[in-house]
């Protein structure tokens, strides 16, 4: 009987065969997890997911073939290196997709807005804490923003057990004068209204004359928005060029752009409205005010005001903090923006033609209006070009180099009530069709003058709408519907 002789390579052959199988199975799991996360985002067409699963199986099969036979050491080493690279790619892809989906869900999770209402005293006042004001008299506005003031006082009494005697004043100017003259020890005022003092030379320094003792946040619930099934979507892009601690805090809207998107014809119309447009606000009594002041009373007021102006329906909004947008542009590696003029702003020089801009330069480009005869109208044009440039850069492969930084910066500078599923559907459609989009921009015009406003009953600079340009904007919006 022939006796079997154990060769030293037999155990090694078996051990490495098992290890190759284990590596291939682990790799398959990682790749399938990646496909699963990709499926859960809703961003990718089903055909692409199926192809991804097939490619994953083929790659795992290749790794298994390369690592199965210990007699081919070089081939086995190549197989393990390939498996390691694919595993790293799978892990990075899992993390990146999870981060992107989480960010987008966070941006679209708009449960409400907030008003920050503060207790203010003069800078050189002896009062250091809210308790020091107990028993003192505070000034409040009699009607303007009264509901937020009353809720803040109720919150303070409930949380801190402190109540105050209050005196009512009709206007923001009267309230400031009362504090300056010592008629009251402090005032209770919505932070958003401090920006209005900057519009009057004799009061523009008032915000620097006061300091906060306490800030209370009043939450305003927003109604649920149903996802539209229409191929035409209209979105209000509202932006502030001043930094806020929270993007969901109400405040002036310095950027007011209506974007009408036709997903069938792949057309986008951007209509910009100057911040100083003198329009009736969507409030009881339809009081006239600057458009920029509408944002102080909430996105619903701003949206309704523009809907009335253009006789159109706006489905959703996107709120952007343009100061925070600096980080997004830097993470993208800068943008390319065309300028119609040579001008200087914010310490930077811009030339006619294409300009390569970083975040700080892009903000200066988007904010400047005094250098142009058309003022706010030209600024609105620049803001639309910055938005278009960011979209173009975001759709290019270069976005991958700063992906993690971009995700981090987006979280802090924008929110929207556009449903997540609608955004995912739009991404799927773009990936499936890969169609170029045609973008048209239009800015309405007006005539500068001075008039009384609802928020600040004082002669302020406003822009009377040019009805011819407003009508043209209406026609353009209607044509894309």
Image (cartoon, rainbow, N blue to C red):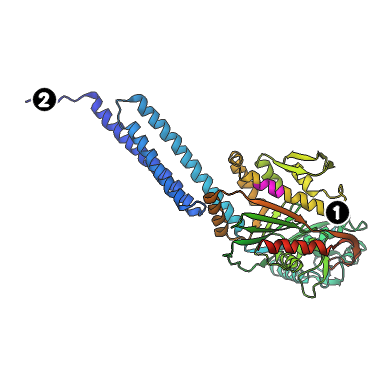
Element class at badge 2: loop
Q: Is residue 61 above or below residue 100?
A: above
Q: Position of residue 339 (x, y in %)?
A: 78, 43
| Residue extent of the magenta highlight | 386-391
Which is closer to the viewer, label 1 or label 2? 2
Q: Please give the label number shown on residue 36.
A: none
Q: Position of residue 195 (x, y in %)?
A: 82, 58
Q: Residue furthest bottom?
A: 285
**Label 1: few (<14), some or many (≥20) within 10 Å?**
few
Q: Which of 11/137 is in front? A: 11
Q: Could you tell me which quadrant the C terminus lies in? A: bottom right
Q: Please give the label number shown on residue 3.
A: 2
- Identify the mark nearer the N-term, 1 or 2: 2
Magenta span: predominant SS is helix
Q: Please give the label number shown on residue 208.
A: 1
Check residue 83 for magenta coloring.
no
Q: Is residue 78 above or below residue 237?
A: above
Q: Residue furthest left?
A: 1
Element class at badge 1: helix
């Amino acid at each position: 009987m022939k006796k079997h002789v154990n060769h030293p390579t037999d155990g090694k052959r078996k051990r490495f065969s098992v290890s190759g199988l284990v590596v291939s199975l682990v790799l398959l799991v990682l790749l399938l997890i990646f496909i699963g996360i990709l499926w859960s985002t809703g961003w990718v067409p089903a055909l692409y997911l199926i192809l991804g699963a097939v490619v994953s199986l083929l790659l795992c099969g290749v790794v298994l073939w390369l690592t199965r036979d210990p007699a081919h050491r070089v081939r086995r080493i190549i197989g393990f290196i390939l498996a390691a690279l694919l595993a790293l790619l799978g892990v990075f892809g899992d993390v990146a997709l999870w981060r992107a989906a989480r960010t987008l869900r966070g941006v679209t999770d708009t449960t409400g807005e907030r008003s920050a209402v503060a207790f203010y005293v003069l800078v050189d006042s002896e009062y250091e804490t809210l308790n020091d004001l107990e028993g003192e008299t505070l000034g409040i506005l009699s009607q303007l923003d009264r509901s937020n003031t009353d809720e803040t006082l109720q919150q303070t009494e409930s949380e801190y057990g402190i109540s105050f005697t209050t005196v009512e004043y009709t206007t923001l100017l009267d309230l400031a004068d009362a504090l300056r003259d010592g008629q009251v020890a402090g005032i209770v005022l919505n932070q958003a209204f401090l920006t209005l003092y900057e519009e009057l030379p004799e009061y523009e320094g008032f915000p620097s004359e006061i300091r906060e003792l306490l800030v209370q946040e009043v939450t305003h619930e927003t109604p649920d928005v149903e996802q539209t099934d229409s191929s035409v979507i209209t979105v209000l892009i509202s932006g502030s060029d001043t930094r806020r601690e929270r993007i969901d805090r109400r405040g002036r809207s310095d950027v007011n752009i209506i974007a009408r998107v036709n997903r069938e014809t792949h057309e986008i119309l951007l209509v910009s409205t100057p911040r100083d447009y003198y329009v009736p606000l969507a409030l009881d009594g339809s009081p006239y005010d600057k458009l920029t002041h509408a944002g102080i009373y909430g996105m619903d007021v701003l949206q309704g005001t523009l809907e009335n102006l253009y006789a159109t329906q706006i489905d959703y909004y996107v709120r952007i903090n343009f100061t925070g947008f600096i980080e997004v542009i830097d993470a993208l590696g800068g943008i390319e923006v065309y300028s119609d003029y040579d001008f200087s702003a914010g310490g930077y020089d811009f030339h006619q033609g294409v300009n390569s801009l970083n975040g700080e330069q892009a903000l200066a480009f988007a904010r400047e209006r005094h250098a142009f005869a058309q003022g706010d109208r030209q600024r609105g044009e620049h803001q639309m070009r910055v938005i278009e440039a960011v979209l173009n850069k975001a759709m290019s492969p270069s976005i991958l180099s700063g992906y993690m930084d971009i995700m981090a910066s987006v979280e802090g500078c924008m929110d929207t009530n556009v449903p997540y599923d609608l955004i995912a559907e739009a991404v799927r459609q773009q990936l499936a069709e890969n169609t170029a989009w045609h973008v048209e921009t239009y800015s309405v015009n007006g005539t500068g003058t001075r008039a009384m406003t609802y928020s600040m009953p004082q002669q302020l600079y406003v822009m009377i709408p040019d009805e011819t340009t407003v009508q043209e904007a209406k026609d353009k919006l209607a044509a894309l519907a």
